[in-house]
Image (spheres, rainbow, N blue to C red):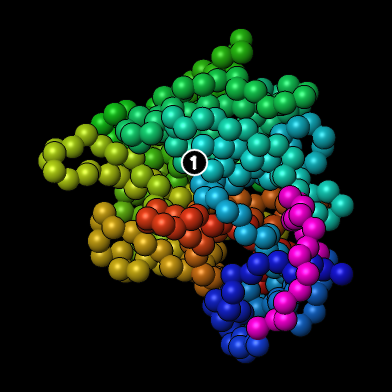
Amino acid sequence: MIPKIDLLSSDINEEVFGRTVAKKEPAPQVAPQQPKDDSRTHPEKLVQGGFQENGAAGQTDIFLPGPEASSRANFWKSSNFEYLINGITLGDVNGDKKTETVVVTPTEVRIFSMEANRFKEIAKIDMGHFIHIVGVDSADINGNGYAEIFVSATNTQKNAAQSFILEFNGTQYVPILEKSPWFYRVVGQQTGNPILLGQKISLGDPFSGDIVEMTWKDRKLVQEKTVWDKAGLNLMGFSLGDVQNNGQSLYLAYDSYDHIRLLGSSGKALWEGSDKLGGSTLYFTLSQADPGAENVRYLPMRTIIHDIDKNGKAEVIVAKNHEISGRLLDRFRVYTKSQFQFLSWDGIGLSLLQETRTISGFVRDFFIGDFDGDGKDELVAAIVIKEGSMAFTEPKSTIIAYEMNDMPKR
């Protein structure tokens, strides 16, 4: 029997699945239950007839109708978490040859595993209240069998980087680098060739530092080569790959206005998108030119370049958060719904291949990998339902996963 979990109410059904949920009479009073287990149920995926009220997985119309193939896809959702998730990644962080899910809150790193079809928290590392975590990645860059956890963070004033790296020592997760002035991003995990990138964050502007490839040498993290030496990009929204499917690796990044740009090694823009994609409420505080106004720069979201439909051509995967003001206000951001878009190079630019239906809440971060150990890739996303930034409100987040094998083929 699949236990009932807290869904995104009728919004999930109306926004994601395009159906209206009938109002039900209140359930009769029942006897108190036993204390709730910390694990999260992961039911069987092949539930026919849609996403059920008493289940966390199903097969439903995740993708918007298109001219090619069926748009039905398998979908999974965790219980709601009473904390704010600021980042998510997948990796074998404890050397057990299985994939763990790593999520970060503003001050914690939490690690989950799928055991006996249950999504269970197996570790929590509290980093104290003097940092603010803004991103996470993992990869075994030092080659010792344990994927390091690269955590990008700022100080509490949000005007300087204060990142750290954790690694499993056989019994617990310990810092192997702390108070780093760098942001970190790992690209290429899906191809089996992960590359660690770093950007030293200055007090002046998080979009100004060089982006470099990094590696371990004599147990120290060192710069190996410069990847990008032009101003205007932040590493959190930067990736590289064969976007044009011609064997040439190019750079893909958000500018400070959330427009996607495809860039050559010379720094020349090969293509620039006109739509605002991504969209985050995580920000960096700049030095104040006007003491009466807060000067902030919002950090960009992750982009992923990956051949998700296994046709030999790479796609670009981005989130699109819908802002209540239509992105008309630079310093005021409130997102109410979101969706994913899959873009492909058509010879002229990046065109929309497919997109998911909108869901309530907004995407904080996402990743692609074998989330549940079934041998298939899933797109796994951290969804913020309530940010808890207003007085008398508590944060609430959840994790969702789409089966990528079910994406309509082109």
Residue nearest the viewer, comparing 14 with 146: 14
The amino acid type of the residue labelled 1 equals Pro
Q: Is residue 48 visible?
A: yes
Q: How many marks?
A: 1
Q: Is residue 255 left or right of residue 211?
A: left
Residue labelled with disc 1: 106
Q: In percent of the image, x 73 and y 21: which residue is there? A: 169
Q: Main secondary structure of the magenta part?
A: loop
Q: Secondary structure at mark 1?
A: loop
Location of the C terminus by quadrant is: bottom right
Q: In the picture, residue 44 is in which quadrant?
A: bottom right
Report the magenta residues as a range.
26-43
Residue nearest the viewer, comparing 80 with 90: 80
Question: Horizontal and vertical percent for residue 331?
Answer: 26, 54
Q: In the picture, residue 196 is in which quadrant?
A: top right
Q: Is residue 108 left or right of residue 279?
A: right
Q: Is residue 38 magenta?
A: yes
Q: Is residue 174 left or right of residue 201?
A: right
Q: Is residue 344 visible?
A: no
Question: Horizontal and vertical percent for residue 235?
Answer: 43, 39
Question: Horizontal and vertical percent for residue 53?
Answer: 71, 77
Q: In percent of the image, x 57 and y 54: which residue is there? A: 82
Whether 151 is drawn above or below 329: the answer is above
Q: Is residue 171 magenta?
A: no
Whether 341 is drawn above or below 136: the answer is below
Location of the N terminus by quadrant is: bottom right
Q: In percent of the image, x 41 and y 63: which residue is there? A: 335
Q: In percent of the image, x 69 and y 50: which residue is there? A: 369
Residue nearest the viewer, comparing 187 with 363: 363
Question: Horizontal and vertical percent for residue 252?
Answer: 45, 48
